[in-house]
Image (spheres, helix red, strand yellow):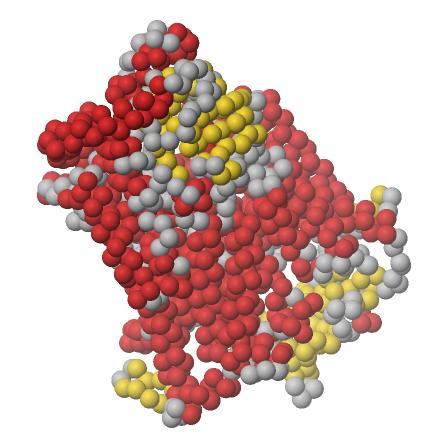
């Protein structure tokens, strides 16, 4: 077994593309779930909104890729209103149910044969990201050449998308961080604790919740947009219910209601994932059998790793619900 | 959690009260109380009596849950600039009536006017900007925010509470400073300034009541509605709370409060409204009420022999 | 930082508490493992280590309305050719309508079906032409699955009334299953306030246990009660060693909800690992010919599961209405404080609801597995319909779950008649969900709640 390979994989994934777009989505989810206490279990739908908004530009609408940002935001706002308007006056569980349901429907719609000409069905959409990659080339990053040192060597294409991604993370982190220090953020945090108190002090709780849902959803959509241009292809099954859950897992690992938590959490999530995945791949180079009984083979590794991650989430919630970096007094997300 | 914290504050609360606050309150007390009582002196002590200058008027407000009628108030008026107590046995519908008046619940039928404006169907958050603010029976201090943040939340019309301004501190920084100054002033008055930067969760039950009242004042109300301000407050702090409630009237605000503590009712109210089984059964000055047989019956009926003045 | 300074003895207590908490976590994990141990025996999918194309030929049996009933078509010849047109391999579908053709690697292929080998009277449906191209990048795992569907060759124009009745019959079957699965979900919410996102996996669990015993040679008639008992045990252990402990510790509802998300992820991937990604039918009653009752065609299997579901639901309703347990359940779910003040032991009621809910979910899972096929995400797919159903009926209401679940099932199937594409037939459930929340958030049978 090559332990060096396992560790290299872990380190690279820790700062890699997936950690990056998860972090953007988690920053958005944190606005809703962490700071306002909204149970948005459909962040995948917002991410899909952004991703498809980007991906539709060139192949479907035949317009420049950059319009995709506006399309993605428009989709996200539409979704947010659809989910929020009926539910945000009601108790918290209804939002959870409607978001999880909407996310499922969004996925079904984009993968349906019916809308193949709009969303590309199960094959998804490709062939729109060239102008994004071109910017990297224009800035002097040769897409095939290698840059960096030691294990941190990336192709120009990878380096470009990482630079863009982590810059986006920084921008959104800064936006959310400063918003949460403003009186606006103060109202959100107060809503998380006790809606009625806020209502009695003359704030429209409903309107703030909606703003929070829309802002968090839009940031989630940017996560999706970044995924779309970074990956140069979108497929519907990426945006499954599990995606939301994994973003959420990343967020709670880092600690909710903390901007740093929403960045470091997803990094740790993917770090652990890569570690387990590459470790298992090293160990299970051929199927492990006990007699006739196949314990594990290479095709099972994905499922086994996710199973461990799910169990890890359960254990973390039981032992340390405030996350690794959270302070229990301030961060526990049960306001009650 | 509450228990160990209240130990620390009993001493802190006790030392402040006896001195300055009470004497000042006493001095002003006579002036404003006399004014309020004079205005109410001509009012007949009967349910639904008209007042010379009512700030709040309710008509035919009715609310039923399932088959049970919780509130059925025919007519009620609250005199401007007075302290009016709303009393009654458990389940009399006082808190429900409060919820109806403040928009936290909507009545099946009925109308009510605040300062001449119809308030039917007005969302609860609009009440505060119109000058009507309430507190809750179970305190709703936001325990994971600091005391000063709690206070600042109370201010209305904050520019920085618009998200697009949130990103640009320049648009709200000056207003924030003004709000903070006002909050600090109120904290000082309510003797919470030493807890300014603590989490509200670190306060005792009584201090939370004070904080909630102070926070309500941040909205610059004309009518303050207090739901059982004395519930769960230790005796040492009660005097201080009394003084603060009087202070509100003395600054020109109208106070309507629900209370079980008959000592407090007797001490500070200018007018008392009694509810039982959802209806107003009596009104009058505290002295009228103590001798009113309907009231005594209502309490005896549900409390099975306990004295009217006995604490809950 | 806050409050009075704590002494070192307090820290000791904290440490001790942490230790005890860890012990509990270990206990919980053991509980979870024991609960899943029964499933560990599920045979992992037997597949060659190299790449392969797996072709399934299924007969939809019904036409016009496009409902897939997944009846396997054996004896069909299938050929795979590569990009240059050279034959890579061929085979004939087995009893399950499946043939696996190994291919040299992930590349572009074309799968061709010999239409002359189809059974008499059958023809390929329009959605799946006799030649299907396979792109190299569509191999997600080593095995790429291709489906062919057949239908009646002579399309008889069915009348509107017949289509409606056929859809209605399908909808009733789905509705009964959703209603059965939702009872536990709704009552657990009603009594404890917990939204259990792992409830779908409880449904899958039932289907899986029955499948496990079924493949070991136990007839499905016997495997079903075994699955129901296992479902009850799972419900019992989830509460006994899981959520009851969390409640006792005062763990918040949102934390508990996130825990159910974690369980859902873990359990689902466990099923994927042990069961594999493909659908599998039960061994018994797979190849049934539909019988015609008036205008409706239904297989005896589906008819019997529908009748059994209806009986079970009537029994559930009667239990809720008349038995002491049922009354206690409704009381706790209406108002837990009030119920406990009248001497009802709510923790006992909650335990029983978990057991009954688990058992019913398991039964629903088996019936769903019979109706369609068993898959690793069978319950996960139903979860959203269950939520729509219980919200429609009234979150936490006992009968609401029955009525709402049933209505959603019927609606989902009937929606196809109004031009909703078959693959999107779940979408109307979301529309209903949103409309009901706008118009009557307490649901059909729920009572309006006090605000503030």
Q: Nearer the viewer, residue A61 or C363?
A: A61
Quarter of the rendering occupied by the N terminus of chain B: top left
Query: Which of the 4 quarters of the picture holds residue B194?
Result: top left
Q: Position of residue C267 (x, y in %)?
A: 47, 52
* Residue A286 percent coordinates (x, y): 43, 70
- Relative to A49, does residue B11 appear above or below in the rendering? above
Percent coordinates x, y for residue C212 in the rendering = 55, 49
Q: Quarter of the image for the C terminus of chain B: give it.
A: top left
Q: Is residue C360 visible?
A: no
Residue A211's image quarter? bottom left
The x and y percentages for residue B288 are 35, 12
Image position of C362 (left or right of A210): right
Closer-to-camera residue (A58/B274): B274
- Relative to the observer, which residue lies in front, C213 or A322? A322
Q: Residue at x 39, y 41 (%)?
A: B131
* Residue drawn at x 69%, y 36% as measured from the top left: C310
Q: Nearer the viewer, residue A248 or A25?
A: A25
- The image quadrant that residue B176 belongs to is bottom left
Up the image or down, C353 lies above or below C3; here it is above
Residue C438 visible in the snapshot: yes
- Count of labels shown? 0
Q: Name which residue lies at 76% across and 74% down.
A: C130
Residue shown at 84% from the left, 61% from the top: C152
Q: Is residue A48 left or right of residue A31?
A: right
């Amino acid at each position: 077994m090559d332990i060096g390979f396992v560790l290299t994989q872990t380190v690279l994934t820790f700062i890699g593309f997936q950690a990056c777009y998860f972090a953007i989505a988690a920053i958005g989810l944190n606005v809703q779930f962490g700071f306002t206490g909204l149970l948005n279990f459909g962040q995948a739908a917002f991410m899909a909104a952004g991703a498809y908004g980007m991906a539709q530009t060139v192949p479907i609408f035949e317009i420049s890729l950059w319009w995709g940002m506006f399309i993605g935001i428009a989709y996200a706002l539409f979704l947010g209103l659809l989910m929020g308007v009926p539910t945000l006056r009601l108790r918290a569980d209804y939002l959870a149910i409607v978001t999880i349901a909407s996310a499922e429907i969004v996925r079904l719609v984009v993968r349906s044969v019916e809308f193949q000409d709009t969303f590309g069905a199960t094959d998804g959409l490709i062939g729109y990201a060239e102008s994004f990659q071109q910017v990297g080339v224009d800035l002097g990053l040769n897409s095939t050449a290698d840059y960096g040192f030691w294990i941190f060597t990336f192709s120009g294409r990878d380096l470009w998308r990482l630079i863009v991604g982590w810059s986006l993370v920084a921008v959104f982190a800064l936006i959310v961080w400063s918003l949460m220090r403003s009186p606006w953020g103060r109202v959100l945090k107060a809503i998380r604790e006790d809606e009625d108190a806020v209502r009695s002090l003359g704030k429209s709780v409903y309107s703030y919740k909606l703003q929070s849902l829309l802002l968090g959803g839009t940031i989630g959509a940017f996560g999706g947009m970044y995924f779309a241009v970074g990956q140069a292809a979108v497929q519907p099954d990426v945006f499954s219910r599990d995606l939301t859950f994994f973003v959420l897992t990343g967020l709670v690992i880092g600690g909710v209601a903390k901007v740093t938590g929403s960045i470091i959490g997803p990094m740790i999530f993917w770090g652990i994932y890569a570690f387990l995945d590459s470790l298992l791949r090293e160990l299970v180079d051929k199927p492990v059998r006990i007699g006739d009984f196949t314990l594990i083979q290479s095709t099972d590794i994905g499922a086994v790793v996710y199973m461990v991650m799910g169990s890890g989430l359960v254990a973390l919630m039981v032992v340390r619900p405030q996350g690794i970096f959270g302070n229990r007094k301030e961060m526990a997300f049960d306001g009650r | 959690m509450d228990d160990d914290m209240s130990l620390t504050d009993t001493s802190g609360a006790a030392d402040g009260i006896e001195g300055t606050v009470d004497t000042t309150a006493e001095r002003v007390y006579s002036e404003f109380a006399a004014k309020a009582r004079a205005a109410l002196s001509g009012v007949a002590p009967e349910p639904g009596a008209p007042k010379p200058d009512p700030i709040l008027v309710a008509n035919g407000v009715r609310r039923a849950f399932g088959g049970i009628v919780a509130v059925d108030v025919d007519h009620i008026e609250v005199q401007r600039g007075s302290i009016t107590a709303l009393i009654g046995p458990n389940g009399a519908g006082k808190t429900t009536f409060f919820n109806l008046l403040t928009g936290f619940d909507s009545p099946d039928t009925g109308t009510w006017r605040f300062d001449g404006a119809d308030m039917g169907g007005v969302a609860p958050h609009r009440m505060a900007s119109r000058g009507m603010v309430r507190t809750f029976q179970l305190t709703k201090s936001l325990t994971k925010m600091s005391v000063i943040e709690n206070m600042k939340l109370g201010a209305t019309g904050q520019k920085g509470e618009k998200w697009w301004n949130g990103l640009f501190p320049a648009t709200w920084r000056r207003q924030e400073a003004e709000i903070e100054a006002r909050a600090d002033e109120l904290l000082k008055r309510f003797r919470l300034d030493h807890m300014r930067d603590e989490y509200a969760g670190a306060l005792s039950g009584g201090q939370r009541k004070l904080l909630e009242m102070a926070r309500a004042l941040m909205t610059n109300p004309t009518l303050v509605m207090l739901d059982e301000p004395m519930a769960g407050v230790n005796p040492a702090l009660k005097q201080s709370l009394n003084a603060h409630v009087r202070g509100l009237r003395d600054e020109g605000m109208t106070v309507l409060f629900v209370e079980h503590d008959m000592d407090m009712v007797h001490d500070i109210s200018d007018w008392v409204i009694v509810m039982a089984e959802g209806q107003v059964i009596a009104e009058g000055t505290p002295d009228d009420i103590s001798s009113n047989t309907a009231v005594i019956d209502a309490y005896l009926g549900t409390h099975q022999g306990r004295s009217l003045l006995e604490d809950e | 930082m806050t409050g009075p300074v704590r002494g070192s003895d307090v820290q000791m207590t904290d440490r001790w508490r942490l230790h005890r908490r860890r012990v509990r976590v270990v206990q919980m994990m053991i509980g979870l493992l024991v609960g899943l141990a029964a499933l560990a025996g599920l045979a992992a999918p037997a597949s060659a280590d190299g790449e392969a194309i797996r072709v399934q030929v299924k007969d939809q049996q019904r036409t016009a309305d496009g409902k897939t009933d997944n009846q396997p078509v054996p004896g069909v010849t299938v050929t795979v050719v590569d990009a240059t047109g050279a034959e890579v391999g061929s085979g004939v579908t087995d009893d399950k309508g499946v043939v696996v053709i190994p291919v040299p690697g992930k590349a572009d292929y074309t799968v061709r079906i010999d239409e002359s080998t189809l059974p008499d009277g059958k023809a390929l449906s329009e959605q799946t032409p006799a030649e299907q191209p396979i792109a190299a990048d569509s191999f997600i795992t080593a095995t790429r699955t291709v489906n062919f569907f057949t239908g009646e060759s002579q399309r008889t124009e069915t009348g509107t009334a017949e289509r409606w009745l056929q859809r209605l019959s399908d909808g009733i079957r789905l509705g009964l299953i959703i209603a059965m699965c939702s009872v536990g979900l709704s009552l657990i919410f009603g009594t404890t306030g917990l939204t259990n996102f792992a409830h779908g996996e409880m449904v899958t669990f039932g289907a899986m246990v029955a499948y496990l015993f079924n493949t070991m040679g136990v007839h499905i008639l016997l495997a079903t009660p075994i699955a129901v008992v296992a479902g009850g045990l799972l419900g019992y252990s989830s509460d006994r060693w899981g959520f009851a402990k969390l409640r006792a510790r005062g763990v918040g509802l949102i934390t508990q909800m996130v825990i159910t998300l974690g369980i859902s992820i873990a359990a689902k991937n466990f099923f994927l690992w042990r069961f594999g990604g493909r659908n599998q039918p039960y061994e018994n009653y797979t190849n049934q010919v539909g019988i015609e009752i008036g205008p409706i065609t239904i297989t005896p299997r589906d008819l019997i599961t529908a009748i059994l579901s209806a009986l079970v639901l009537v029994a559930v309703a009667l239990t809720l209405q008349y038995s002491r347990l049922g009354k206690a359940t409704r009381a706790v779910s209406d108002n837990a404080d009030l119920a406990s003040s009248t001497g009802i032991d709510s923790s006992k009621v909650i335990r029983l609801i978990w057991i009954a809910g688990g058992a019913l979910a398991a039964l629903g899972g088996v019936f769903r597995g019979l109706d369609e096929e068993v898959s690793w995400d069978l319950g996960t797919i139903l979860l959203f319909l269950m939520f729509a159903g219980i919200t429609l009926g009234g979150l936490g209401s006992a009968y609401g779950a029955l009525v709402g679940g049933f209505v959603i099932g019927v609606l989902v199937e009937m929606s196809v008649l109004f031009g909703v594409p078959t693959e999107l037939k779940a979408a109307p459930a979301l529309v209903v969900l949103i409309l009901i929340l706008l118009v009557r958030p307490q649901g059909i049978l729920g009572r309006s709640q006090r605000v503030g």
